[in-house]
Amino acid sequence: MSKKLKIGLFGFGCVGQGLHYVLNNSTGFKADIVKIAVKNREKKRTVAADLITYDKWEILNNPEIDVVVELIDDADEAFNIVSEALKRGKHVVTANKKLLAEHLEELYKLQQENNVSLLYEASACGSIPIIRTLEEYFDNEELVKVSGIFNGTSNYILTKTISEKLTYGEALKQAQDKGFAETDPTNDVEGFDPKFKAIIIALHAFGLIIKPEQVLNLGVTTLHENDIKYASEKGYKIKLTPIIQRVEENKISVFVAPRFVKANNHLFNVDNEFNGVIVEGKFSGEQFLQGKGAGSYPTGAAVLSDISALSHGCKYEFKKYAQKKSPEFTNEVLLHVYFRYNKVEELKRFELAEVNEKYTGTEYNYVVGKLNLQQILNNREFILKNNLFLSLVDETVELDQKVNKQIVSKELELV
Ligand code: HSE
């Protein structure tokens, strides 16, 4: 029989309170929160005062506590807490995607060295059990692609502004009031949050560890009425979609960008704070998972599921990473995009590998064609600063033969 776990909780914000509620209202699983460490001494708390501490060591040095649950906002302090806990032989559950995406390799080693478990289902796509699905079910199968909607706030804003005609400010305020948004919502709307989640998923799906700065994240802040008009006329919805794609046997591409989604795509009807994940296996084909991607109770439920899994000895095995046959990461791919710009000089920064459609008007211009991902990443700041908008028109991710030929010819010159 599994033993009743003693939990030390860090953070009592949206997810911390969600976990507290879900735990106290669960009939199936029991665990005790013995201490809650918080930062703000002024905030009124809804739990008994003797549960609260302002001193992290009260939890980290308490031998009675066997599980640390880390749900604070500050990713750097979260890293200190999680590493100290693992070094002290405590199991850890976290929902902090930034912490994970920035330190996957160190955290992997800390788990191995200290023979403890770090679980983080709630860090990616809220209540959708994507990490465990990849870890346990797809641990052996070679995957082709994982894509979807990994951020509830931006999806909520896109749904409310486009379909329900709320202003951007109103929709964002609602997402904040409902507890979906990050403390700094730039993380949501500029695509940082789904990028961190894509990086975590890339490790479990493909055995690949990459750094956030290697990965393009474009968001929805420069989306304009004219882009919405273009998409609506063609029957598309606009979604912010991370794509993690095998482009060759040993090459994986990862990025986050807006995408025009057709009505026959699984993601078309994933609205509001819902997330969706499509996993494509070499043999199994496509699987689609949908669920609430943000919010106090759904995320609290995912944290509780990890705590319950710990009580049964669950530990990620990272099989695809541990095999030491990890694929290479590449940005040298072509994406099929709609690109809206103001002046011809802006377009000239990009080399179009193919042009399918072009519009030149008095107010704005756009082109539909193929662009190199690395070139888009190099111009990310420029795109944002000049209010340009780029969206995928389909899911095509193909190796950029031109770049690869150049690389090959450079290598030949060296020989
Ligand atoms: N801000 C995140 C989102 C919370 O909107 O998806 C869940 O990770």
Image (spheres, rainbow, N blue to C red):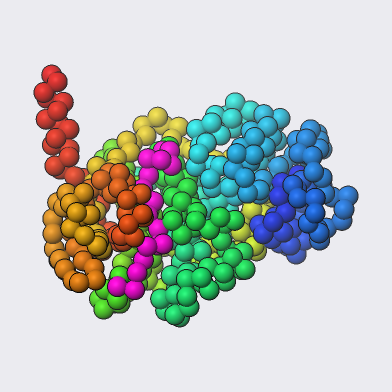
Q: Position of residue 83 (x, y in %)?
A: 64, 33
Q: Is residue 119 above or below residue 226?
A: above
Question: Which residue: 18% across, 58% down?
Answer: 344
Q: Position of residue 102 (x, y in %)?
A: 50, 39
Left or right of 248? Residue 159 is right
Total marks shown come to 0
Could you tell me which residue is drawn at 50 percent across and 50 percent down?
A: 131
| Residues rendered magenta in the picture | 210-226
Q: Quadrant of the C terminus?
A: top left
Kindly tell me whether residue 126 is visible in this rendering: no
Front residue of 53 and 383:
383
- Tell me the residue at 23%/68% (across/down): 364
> Of all residues shown, which one is farthest toward the top?
415
| Residue 308 image point, x, y percent | 67, 51
Q: Is residue 224 magenta?
A: yes
Q: Can you tell which quarter of the image residue 44 is in?
A: bottom right
Locate residue 200, reporting x and y percent: 47, 45
Residue 39 placement, left or right of 113: right
Please give the name of the residue rendered at 54% of the width and 47% of the height, measured from the top-left corner. 97
Up-down relation of residue 203 to residue 353 (above or below): above
